[in-house]
Image (spheres, helix red, strand yellow):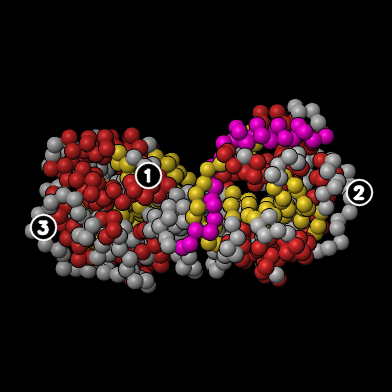
Amino acid sequence: MKRKIIIDTDPGQDDAVAILLALASPEELDVLAIVAVAGNVGLAKNAKNALKVVELSGRTDVPVYAGSVSPMRRKPVTAEHVHGATGLDGPDLPEPKLKLQPQHGVDFLIDTLLAAEPGSITLCTLGPLTNVAMALVKAPATARGIAEIVMMGGGYFEVGNITPAAEFNIFVDPEAADVVLRSGVKITMIPLDVTHGVLSTRPRLDRIAAIGNRVGKAVDEMLSFSERFDLNKYAARGAPLHDPCVIAYLLRPDLFEGREISVTVETHSELTMGLTVADWWRITDRPRNVFYLRRADADGFYALLNQRLARLP
Amino acid sequence: MTIVKRKLIILTDPGQDEAVAILVILGSPDDFEVLGVVATAGNIELDYTEKNARKILELAGRSDIPVFAGCPRPMHRPLVTAAHVHGPTGLDGPDLPEPTMPLQKKHGVDWLVETVMAAEPGTITICSLSPLTNLAMALVREPAIASRIKEIVMMAGAYFEMGNITPTAEFNIYVDPEAADVVLRSGIKMTMLPLDVTHQMLSTRARLDRFRALGNRCGVAVAEMMTFSEPFDLKKYGWDGAPLHGPCVPAFMLKPELFQGREINVTVELGSELTMGMSVADYWRITDRPKNVFYVRSGDAAGYYDLIAERLARLP
């Protein structure tokens, strides 16, 4: 049976690859919509990038919505230093002809989830959790329609990237992450602990480029652009490839390992703001609210990515 | 050949792994001159830790080294102990006799201040195996000691391994985060040996058997101590040995080539109960916070255990 998903995202090169992976997997995934959120760059650019990615994939049937323009409580923080001025620097993609849907993305989430069979839609969040939290606050019954939230966010053993203690998606809107983590909805979290093990080495990018289609070429160009920051910072063989892990987990959960634990977001102290306090060793009595992934089979992941991207134009 | 011995003041709350650290120091008399031991409240209450310190000195035949009791509580927070790891006396395992050497009358903080102020500047190394209460109290009492201490080498904190007493805090920092903050901001040269390195130093069965096979009373006692304290960690982590924390401090001083680290900023979390006592290490140097710590990230476990065995073998 196909899984119905909504992708909430702030593309972003790695977000774009995640979207492409999902759109290349129509046998498993029914992508109902893409909802943009402010994150890697501002909302307008993220929304436009989502349209570009949809056009690149040839799946112009998938509607794109623009959601929240800023985090719930804090000032926006962006990451142009990683993603470039447009948020999707690297490939030379045409201006999109597709238009955004007129409805606000949060209202689309609410309407769709309230109308859906209970527990029937999976939310894949690749950016800050603002839209999902706003929906849960505005209409708490939204939670009923959610099968599961699979999110790229957080870090424990790899701790942080935007600060020494916080991963970007959580740091940008820690209050939203806190709302989501306390919502009681089934949650799978894919943290830096996993994504830092899934490195886009040169041979892996070369294999993607060698597929020979326009999508493979664009993905190579995107990741070659965005990896420069991380290669310099971590002095590693490749940069972490974060967001496609979310879609890969839906397609091949056997590639991942994790455990049910408590995860609590720091929202009080500026020093550790947005830290995902993961009780990995289960030393507290905090209730388990997250299936927390710890590692992935990187070779298996890249084999899957190659296989799926090859199905696109 | 002249060997310049390093003058040490040991701050400690033994604790089995602290006891092993002290024994490694005492097994290295060509390298270290121990001026005194200041007991700290930590793994267990101060009444036990000062007594345990004396037991260990007597075990090693070094009752000439004075032991002082420091503060019975942290600077700001109520004391948290770890009797669930170390046992009700803090040093369960071997059957060590009641100590006969006296506890010094002077308060450990006062002795620390007086000793540092009386010594040549830059000659005394502080070896911290416990919460940093007594050093922080000394720094508050007499700020001038900061420029006179050669360096601090401490077992404390964590970044990649995050925490042990809470999901985000290592025990020595968590027990007295305000004290750790005072020390980290003191401007004194310091090296931090965090869980990131001690969690690589696992006391496997083979390594403990090797200590026992040394045949001296110290080697046997170390094997018995570790055999007592390790089940907690073995059960928790599912590893084939428990982390042996404290001896990383003397091992780093004796053989720094066994370890890798870098100069970074470390700041202690004081503002939130959820993350209280986290040592926020800017390992990737992404902030402009001033570098205040040589932060050790990894170590050679085989070389570490070789060194410990070699030094323990020199003791009674």
Query: Element at badge 3?
Result: loop
Which residue is label 3 attached to?
A: B99
Which residue is label 2 attached to?
A: A97
Q: Residues within 10 Å of mark 3 (few under 14, many from 20)?
A: some
Q: Which residues are magenta?
A: A286-313
Instruction: Name the residue at 78% across, 53% down.
Output: A33
Q: Residues within 10 Å of mark 1 (few under 14, many from 20)?
A: few
Q: Position of residue B245 (x, y in %)?
A: 33, 48
Q: Is residue B162 above or below residue B110?
A: above
Amino acid found under the numbered disc labelled 1: Gly
Q: Position of residue A278 (x, y in %)?
A: 50, 56
Q: Position of residue A225 (x, y in %)?
A: 73, 40
Which residue is label 1 attached to?
A: B238
Judged left or right of residue A255, residue A38 is right
Pick whichever of labels 1 and 3 is earlier in the sequence. Answer: 3
Q: Nearer the viewer, mark 1 or mark 3?
A: 1
Q: Quadrant of the N terminus of chain B?
A: top left
Let me know if residue B181 is in the magenta part. Answer: no
